[in-house]
Image (spheres, grey):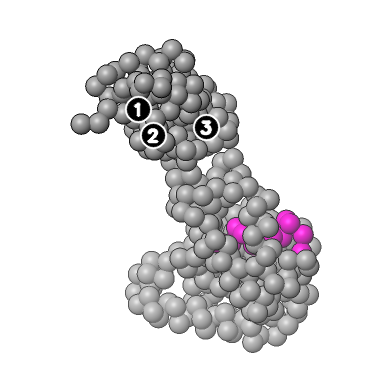
Amino acid sequence: MITFKPKQITKKLLSALPERARDVLTKRYGLGNDTESFTLESIGQAYGITRERVRQIEAYGITSIQKSPIYGEYKEVFDELHRLIEELGGGFIAEDHLLEALSSDQSTRNHIYFLLIVGDPFYRAKENNSYAHRWFTEREKADTVEKALRNVHQSLERDQLVSEEDILARFKEQLIGLADKYNEDVLKRWLMVSKDISRNPLGEWGHTTSPNVKVKGIRDYAYLVVKRHGSPMHFREVANMIEQLFERKAHVATTHNELIKDKRFVLVGRGLYALSEWGYSAGVVKDVLRDILEKHGPLTRDEIIDKVRKERYVKDNTIVVNLQDTNLFKRLANGAYALVTE
């Protein structure tokens, strides 16, 4: 991916500095034999100076390198990094994704990162609550992408999940004048800059904080399984599918207990669970019968069976047996059923 040798270049650039400044930068950016990056405080303790003084030395070192004759010798290297930011991310890319694309070796990544810090044909924006550390080549473009990401996040409901096709369509609508200039790989990289939206293990997008995206336990995996299936599932099937899709051990009893406790699921038959968001109501068959008659008034036997079957996976005879509870239901002269009123 890169045509230069980062470690050799950083060594040359650091040679322009006095010993202490060179050592501070080496420690701060993990440029030595050890890839660990030290904090301002830990370096200050080693030298017996304040962390603010270390920060000043760091800033002095970077500025001195940029002003040194050696820096000018590597213009082509910084131009290449600029070009790579354009090619990989359309001029806007999350720091982690950029470094991962340029090298698989942590030590080499540290040296590339230092070159990015020292270079001036591109810019870095620090991580905040909404966006990851990111690099860009044009500030106006970065502002446009960040605004689009914010609008996409606001267009999603708290626990809503959308397909990758849908999230890209929403994103393109917001990228005024930019979407048509870049392919979907670039747009996906832009989406990954956001800390407010992300993908779940099934590739669906939503709010990062939603349990439907930030999957933590069996009940969250179960939700994704049932939603993907699209119709009610037996808890044994749910446990088996969790293991198949996510390669995560799911005990049948544990899975059943989690389904019972989570309001996202509704028991609709013997061991069968559906999602509440599909319109199923909670409760036993009698509860469903009562809700239906309260909503629609007197109904015939066949009408009641038809409506209950949309709420529960039960046999017709089970519905009829429950209608015989004379404390709750009564049969009218015309054969229809209604609720018993006090």
Q: How far separated are the C-alphas under marks 2 and 1?
A: 7 Å
In the rendered structure, are the residues bearing label 1 and label 3 in contact, judged by CB atoms less than 8 Å apart?
A: no
Graded by Cα atoms within 10 Å as few (under 14), some (14 to 19) or many (20 or more), the crowding at tag 1 reads many
Highlighted range, magenta:
182-194
Identity, as a three-letter code, of the amino acid under mark 1: Ala
Q: Quadrant of residue 178?
A: bottom right
- Give left or right: position of 332 versus 73: left
SS category of the residue bearing label 1? strand
Q: Is residue 20 magenta?
A: no
Query: Residue at the spot x=57%, y=79% of the render?
Result: 62
Identity, as a three-letter code, of the amino acid under mark 2: Gly
The one nearer the camera, 243 or 232, is: 232
- Residue 175 drawn at (x, y percent): 68, 69
Q: Is residue 255 something one can see in this rendering?
A: no
Q: How far separated are the C-alphas under marks 1 and 3?
A: 34 Å
The one nearer the camera, 140 or 152, is: 152
Query: Residue at the spot x=48%, y=29% of the render?
Result: 307
Query: Residue at the spot x=50%, y=46% of the render?
Result: 213
Judge depth for marks 3 and 2 and give the one in front: 2
On the image, numbered disc 1 is attached to which residue?
Answer: 338
Graded by Cα atoms within 10 Å as few (under 14), some (14 to 19) or many (20 or more), the crowding at tag 2 reads few
On the image, numbered disc 2 is attached to which residue?
Answer: 297
Q: Is residue 187 magenta?
A: yes
Identity, as a three-letter code, of the amino acid under mark 3: Val
On the image, numbered disc 3 is attached to which residue?
Answer: 226
In the rendered structure, are the residues bearing label 2 and label 1 in contact, judged by CB atoms less than 8 Å apart?
A: yes
Graded by Cα atoms within 10 Å as few (under 14), some (14 to 19) or many (20 or more), the crowding at tag 3 reads many
